[in-house]
Image (spheres, rainbow, N blue to C red):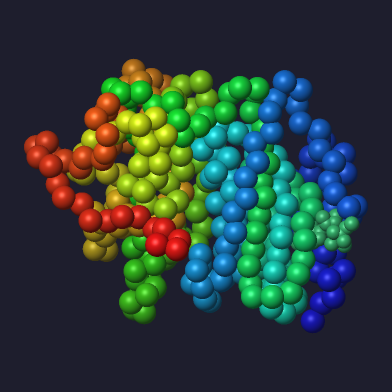
Amino acid sequence: MLSEREIIKLITGKTGAPRDDVALGIGDDAAVLQPRSGHELVVCADTLVAGVHFPDGTAPSAIGHKALAVNLSDLAAMGAEPGWALLALTLPEADEAWLREFATGFSELATRFEVMLVGGDTTRGPLTVSVTALGQVPAGGALRRAGARPGDALCVSGTLGDAALALAQWRAGGVRDVELAARLDLPEPRVALGLALRGIAHAAIDVSDGLLSDLRKLIEADGLGATVEIEQLPRSERFAASGGTTEMMLGGGDDYELLFALPAAALPGLAAHSVTRIGTVEAERGVRCVDGTGRPVKVTAAGYEHFG
Ligand code: ADP
Ligand code: MG
């Protein structure tokens, strides 16, 4: 068992990427940061609770990765460049091997995205990992949920439903597909795409609760609607080959892809990224799903909602 001091010491050895703009990191009462001039800070927080946001038995390195990844996904959806993170850890016991792996998963992702861990808090209780991430955008340049316009192309990055299928496989207790499990445990935040969308996308959101649920948040921000072409929804080969369903693509959570609205003419400029047009923003409120012939399809998947 480690003391709180020893826990902090262990974490201090795995703080991701060193940054010049951190005047004071872990060790004082608070961190001191120096954002670039002419930039605004973009700040978000997300909590992972054992048994709710990740299945019991998830590798500690995956928990460390995911706790940061979901926050970097929020920053990406704002078009922000990530820079700093805080980590509030609640642990039932101070297991050194667990902590080491956890910190390694966190730190590896942080290093890759040039994020530095600059502080946090450590308490005892049921396993809960809460991360606050900070990024920066040129003043006024953050992407928002509001801003979509009728006629905009509705696009999504990557593929949908892989994490939902992995979760279904885990619940069924059978064989878990490694590729799909990685989509659930080790989501890849779409940071580069978020930066590329600055000044191009009219509105953006990350897909964490399920495509339909997050699409509604996007269009309702402007009192608009959308049509979604079911056959255009991007799916991975593994997903298609392993019994993935339309409901999983529409309603499954944990995709951590970006959903955004932009003029169709801007799409070729995003050729370097994995982006699929899945529909169109419309003035008529509500979401309409259509099949390949344009006929309406009834959809039941509601998306994941806490307290639902
Ligand atoms: P305080 O009592 O002033 O809140 P602590 O003794 O809790 O400070 O923490 C000491 C230092 O260690 C602080 O800089 C704090 O930000 C950092 N710290 C504590 N827990 C964590 C953690 N889980 N991850 C990162 N930094 C942490
Ligand atoms: Mg203090």
Relative side of 171 to 133, left or right? left
Numbered-mark total:
0
Q: Is residue 157 above or below residue 224?
A: below
Q: Quadrant of the C terminus?
A: bottom left
**Front in this rendered view, residue 214 or 168:** 214
Q: Residue furthest top?
A: 265
Image point (79%, 49%), residue name: 118
Q: Is residue 61 above or below residue 78?
A: below
Describe residue 165's horizontal placement relative to residue 51 as left or right: left
Image-based side of 253 in relation to 22, left or right = left
Where is 284 relative to 102, above or below?
above
Give x and y (percent) for residue 187.
50, 53
Rendered view: 211 above or below 154: below
Give the quadrant of ligand 2.
bottom right
Quadrant of the image occupied by residue 274: top left
Residue 98, visible in the rendered structure:
yes
The x and y percentages for residue 122 are: 77, 66
Residue for point 57% across, 62% down:
48
Q: Is residue 34 left or right of residue 232?
A: right
Q: Residue at x 46, y 43 (%)?
A: 206
Query: x, y percentage for residue 213?
Result: 36, 48
Examine the rendering and report whether any part of residue 236 can be seen: no
Q: Give how far across and how far down residue 42 sits, in percent.
A: 65, 36
Residue 173, image quadrant: bottom left
Residue occupying the point 57% across, 28% down: 142
Quadrant in the picture for the N terminus = bottom right
